[in-house]
């Protein structure tokens, strides 16, 4: 239906208030500002893997919030 970037941006807009500050920052930089994992890692002085893991967990959380909203 939507490509992944569009879907994540929509979910982020809707559920942003449920995320931590770090989750908001990483998702915003990655999806809204089109930063690479390496650029985000450099900005926060962490590894690329740490950024990837955080983004992946946040994507999963956003999808779970959506499922809970629609199937509650």
Image: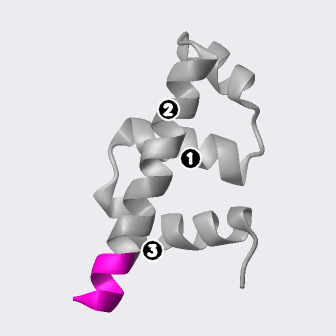
Color scheme of the displayed model: one colour
Note whether 3 is above or below 32 in the view shown. Answer: below
Instruction: Work out how far the residue at label 2 is from the one at label 3, CA to CA, in angstroms.
Output: 22 Å
Camera-nearest residue between 49 and 32: 49
Residue 52, quarter of the rendered image: top right
User: In the rendering, at what x and y percent does residue 46 appear?
Assistant: 53, 12
Q: What stretch is highlighted in magenta?
A: 67-72
Quadrant in which the C terminus is drawn: bottom left
Residue 18, quarter of the rendered image: bottom left
Q: Which of marks 1 and 2 is nearer the N terminus?
A: 1
* Residue named by callout 2: 53
Residue 51, quarter of the rendered image: top right
Instruction: Work out how far the residue at label 1 is from the one at label 2, CA to CA, in angstroms.
Output: 12 Å
Q: Which residue is drawn at 59% across and 48% down?
A: 28
Q: Which of marks 2 and 3 is in front?
A: 2
- 14 horizontally vs 52: left or right: left
Note whether 13 is above or below 72 in the view shown. Answer: above
User: In the rendering, at what x and y percent does residue 61 appear?
Assistant: 37, 57
Q: Which residue is drawn at 68% across and 51% down?
A: 31
User: In the rendering, at what x and y percent does residue 9 appear?
Assistant: 62, 65
User: In the rendering, at what x and y percent does residue 10 appear?
Assistant: 58, 73
> What is the magenta segment's predominant secondary structure?
helix
Q: Which mark is residue 14?
A: 3
Callout 3: helix, strand or loop? helix
* Residue named by callout 1: 27
Q: Residue 19 carries which label?
A: none
């Amino acid at each position: 239906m939507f490509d992944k970037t569009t879907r994540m941006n929509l979910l982020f807009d809707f559920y942003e208030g449920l995320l931590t500050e770090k989750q908001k920052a990483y998702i915003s930089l990655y999806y809204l500002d089109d930063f690479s994992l390496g650029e985000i890692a450099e900005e926060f002085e962490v590894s690329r893997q740490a950024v990837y893991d955080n983004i992946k967990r946040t994507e999963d959380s956003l999808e779970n919030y959506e499922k809970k909203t629609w199937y509650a």
